[in-house]
Amino acid sequence: QCGFRPGLGTLDQLYTLHRGRVLVTGATGLLGRSMCRQLRDDGWSVIAAGFSRALPGTLRCDLTCEEQVHRMVQQQKPDVIVHCAAERRPDIVERASDSALNLNVHATAVLAKEAAFLVYISTDYVFDGRNPPYGEDDAPNPLNLYGRSKMEGEREAQRHCIDCVVLRVPVLFGEVERLEESAVTVLWGSVLDSAQTCSLDHTQQRFPTEVRDVARVCSNICSRRRQDRSVRGVFHFSAQEQMTKYEMAKAIADAFQLPSDHIIPLTEPAPGLTTRPQNVRLACSRLELLDLAVEPRPFRAAILDCLWPFTPDRRWRQTVFH
């Protein structure tokens, strides 16, 4: 049975500030937390919505339930919905396809029907990785079910909400609550365990991008939209430092001045994993043309901020960071 449950509420949710009201789905996730902070800092009244990890002050809403979504939007009346909620793990999508498609596709359609203006967070995995870089108008051709689900989510968003922005982003990292929240920060365990040889993929090219930069771009889009209602369509945002998982781990070790000889490059795709595109570099020309882009933080500087709370030696932390 559908049961929308408002949270305890915050001042942000009670008073509309001059920029308007924005509803953020997946607000308790890695990107959603950063999105809420950035939008509040930029003067928006933020309504944070979550489900499995909904906290006090967060609206608990099952996005796959049309009744709950309709009631939430009608009560909160957001000017903008930023849809961050998704099942983003390709291997999980393959194993639990029904629930993943329900969230990535059906929930997007439900939200799009209710939204005055929707920002849908999508992925570089909508492309096959055979002919980079990919522009905003290049035809998607996903290789796995995760990419297909996000491509279908894009189509549902644009079909039901004419005033829609699709923002495609690559692999993300940021201030995590647990290392497993990001495919980048999870490498920290391999870096720290120097007593064990660790083989990491050295074939798939990735462009790790910090969630704070994505949130800044999204805030820019929302603010510009208040001034210019022609802002719609597909946008790309990505950091430009190209790395394999092996190179990310080596860069993390270098940033923390840790040994990395135990990290070995794996030059063949690991068996049993979901097929992934080899190089989906995104061209970000539309953001740049409209002066909506931001300068991504260098990877080593950003990863230091994200991982220092997980360093085991407090004296090391005090020496380096104070």
Image (tube, grey):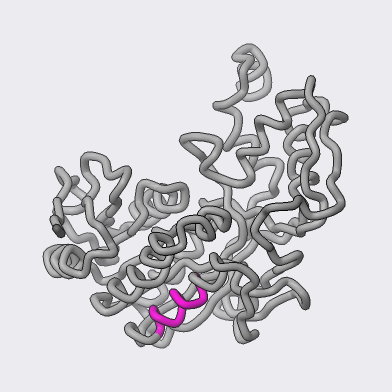
Report how many numbered discs are placed on residues in the image.
Answer: 0
Residue 273 image position (x, y, % from top left) = 67, 54
What residue is at 33 percent from the left and 84 percent from the top? 160
Closest to the observer: 213 or 60? 60
Taking the image as shown, residue 201 lies to the left or right of residue 14, namely: right
Q: Quadrant of residue 68?
A: bottom left
For the C terminus, give its image quadrant. Answer: top right
Residue 152 magenta: yes
Q: Is residue 253 above or below residue 23?
A: above
Is the magenta region chiefly helix, strand or loop?
Answer: helix
What residue is at 67 percent from the left and 22 percent from the top? 320
What residue is at 43 percent from the left and 59 percent from the top? 86
Q: Which residues are magenta?
A: 150-158
What residue is at 69 percent from the left and 47 percent from the top? 299
Q: Residue furthest top?
A: 315
For the N terminus, give its image quadrant. Answer: bottom left
Taking the image as shown, residue 121 lies to the left or right of residue 272, namely: left
Residue 297 image position (x, y, % from top left) = 64, 51
Taking the image as shown, residue 271 lies to the left or right of residue 177, namely: right
Residue 281 magenta: no
Closest to the observer: 137 or 225? 137
Residue 236 image position (x, y, % from top left) = 58, 72
Closest to the observer: 100 or 163? 100
Q: Is residue 242 above or below residue 114?
A: above
Residue 22 image position (x, y, % from top left) = 29, 63
Q: Is residue 135 above or below residue 106?
A: below
